[in-house]
Image (spheres, helix red, strand yellow):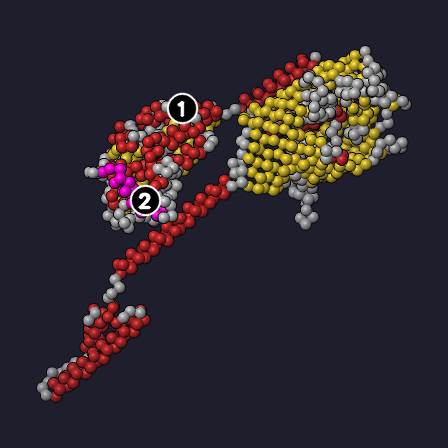
Amino acid sequence: MRPSRLLVLVTAVTSLGVGMPRVVMAEGKALERALAEKRALENKVEALDLKVRQLEQRLEQSLGTAGGARNVVAPTPRTEQVEALDQKVRILERKWELDQEQAAAKAKEAPTITAGRDGFSLRAADNSYQLRIRGYTQADGRFFADDKERALTDTFLLRRVRPILEGTVGKYFDFRIMTDFGGGTATVQDAYLDIHPWSWAKLRAGKYKPPVGLERLQSGAELLFVERGLPTNLVPNRDVGAQVFGDLWDGAFSYAFGAFNGVVDGGSGDLDNNDSKEFAGRLFGFPFKATSIELLQGLGLGIAGTYGDQKGSTGSPFLPTLRTPGQQAFFTYRSDNTAAGTTIANGIHSRVSPQGYYYYGPFGLLGEYVRSYQSVQRGSTEANLDNDSWQVAVSYVLTGENASYRSVSPAQSFDLTKGTWGAFEVAARYSELNVDKDAFPIFADPTRAARVAEAWGLGLNWYLSRNVKFQLNYEQTDFTGGSTKGERPKERAILGRFQVAF
Amino acid sequence: MIVQVLIRAVLLLTMTVGLGASAQAQKNVTLLNVSYDPTRELYQEFNAAFAKYWQGKTGEVVTVNQSHGGSGKQARAVIDGLEADVVTLALAYDIDEIHQRAKRIPADWQKRLADNSSPYTSTIVLLVRKGNPKGIKDWDDLGKPGISVITPNPKTSGGARWNYLAAWGYALRQPGGDEAKAKDLVTRIFKNVPVLDSGARGSTTTFVERGIGDVFISWENEALLAVKELGKDKFEIIYPSVTILAEPPVTVVDKVVDKHGTRAVAQAYLEYLYTEEGQKIAAKHYYRPRQATVAQQYTEQFPRVNLFTIDEVFGGWEKAQKTHFADSGTFDQIYQPGR
């Protein structure tokens, strides 16, 4: 009998014994009564034993074990089985965990595709290979007030349509290709390769902006006014060449020096027509950038210059046409397609341009001066002409965002549902350009070419987002000379722009 | 005139910018120590001690960034361009690779510091669960059926290569031991490995935290750390009858320190490992110190064991690597994932 069964029986007997009336030992009758009670007890024990058996059978049936196999399933093998299964589960879990770690590591190595306000990009995990697609489009309106003789054409135009492809090929090599379809023509504006083993020494080769004019070096998408000021007439636009450049002291100082084919003031070029080259250089620094003088940290000062020896010809005089902010020509050298009557470049051409800007909170100030020395010849007459120009532009962001050389980034984009309007900025500018008086009358016609242009302008910029802006400018230019009647009439231009840039 | 204007302007600009920048120049220097898996805690404490020492000596504030992973993986990262000022890896072969593949250090790098540029040593032990339920006593037991063995992947982990070679060397040193018997033992051991982590720290996680396996072939320091962190009531360390002397080496990465201008501080950083304080920190983190006076203080922590070196049994790391761990080497022959 199993100990459990025995226990049940003993318990039953004991409990019955406890409840039995005290037996009064007596002869005869008392003995009979005792024997009867004993039989009754035996019957009860048998009945209880039967009941326990029945209960055990039911329990065994419910556990699914056969009657005699009650002691067959030992606890030890069962525990081992559970432990083995537990290990298997743990191993599978760990392998899954390691797979996840491996997948996460691989994900870090996978290329990423991004789309955002700075354009679209595809880049390797370590950034050593990148392709960025950017661009901007400017739809302008250009209107002239008080143009009674209708000499100036009011027009809508696509001023710039510029898709940009930039990238990194290998760790140290960047490229940029920017074409322009503005004005209905297609030109390559930028196409260059940068090699940048160190931030302090990089090499750039191709077609790009030589490091000279402060406002010229601003991106066309980040201009404070619709058009650049008069000094930009005297600095190169884009040229083909090579330069070394770099940043020092965490960007507190930058430099660039290069050799280029050489272009006319304000001009661009793709090929040279002579062996002489133009050298350009620029130093620019932020004297207080690394100091704790917060008020002056946004002050940048620099100087740039070029030196070259260029000689023009009757067919290609290599001399500029100077334009107002309304993009109207107000000065050209004499040209009648004859050697005797056409003014041409004749040797040294140099420029110098001290420049600077200052930004503090919403306030901005930009100023530059350019002096361009140009040797010219017309027939047998030669001269060294000295043209100069300067400008000062101030701006204030009404909505409080920081003003910057790199445009304004609105704190909140335009969104009617949220009641946000983007950022608003007002700006004013004065610029002046003086042509050497020795240019007249031999090298330039005083009845057709103005000697001085003085322009002032007011501007309102509405930055709907980092990518979209409206600009509205009023530009008035006064002239000295330039007309048979004395002074060329004032030019009053209203310029508007809708720009999308990404 | 133009030249004069230019010269004056350039001088003025350079002086103002230069003065502003130099006034702000701070004597801060940053090092990157690329190390192997289990040295995290060691170098956390050591870096702080060295920074304090260096600032007191030179006034420079030095920040040491740490990178940890399987030793082989870490070496490859340095070869691929990770700019480590110093490497403190699990085995000399990984640093040799940095010389051979990237030429970032000279061939004789190991002669530049004492003790073959290995400021501390360790060995390989067996960590088992409390009570040693499977009765593991020596390397032979790891190859028996039903024993679950945890060790990382020798392809990626320096520690795993030490583990593998320790078992191999043990088999060779047994009476009648030969290459075939060694291969047989190691094959049987790896048949008992259910999970191959890429580094020693990962294997510690597998065995200690995930509760997988009966025995973990481990760096001695990692085993002592596990016992200390999780209690003697959970694990026991079994010292095999014979095991290997592991000599993790260190070196500056010449091309990087010259580029960063950090050679002096990087050199001093490694030399500081050999000082009494450096040695004590190593011992505190269960690495066997080289300096006898410091080792004397930790005799209880580090039992005497019968050790062999890689040169004695395998003829050096280059030969061992080529024979056992190169593609199609012995390890590739004996271990087939998924089988």
Q: Label 1 amino acid? A: Pro
Residue marked by disc 1: B106
Q: Quadrant of residue B300?
A: top left
Residue B96 within the magenta-colored segment of the rendering: no
Q: Earlier in the sequence, mark 2 or mark 1?
A: 1
Q: Is residue B36 above or below residue A310?
A: below
Residue B275: image location, x then y, percent = 33, 26
Q: Which residues are magenta?
A: B177-195
> Secondary structure beneath disc 1?
loop
Residue A42: image location, x then y, percent = 18, 80
Residue A52: image location, x then y, percent = 25, 75
Q: Quadrant of residue A342?
A: top right
Compare residues B157 and A230 and report the one nearer the observer: B157
CA–CA distance in space, label 2 to label 1: 36 Å
Circle 1 packing at 10 Å, graded few (<14), some (14-19), many (20+), is some
**Rendered residue at 21%/74% (across/down):** A9
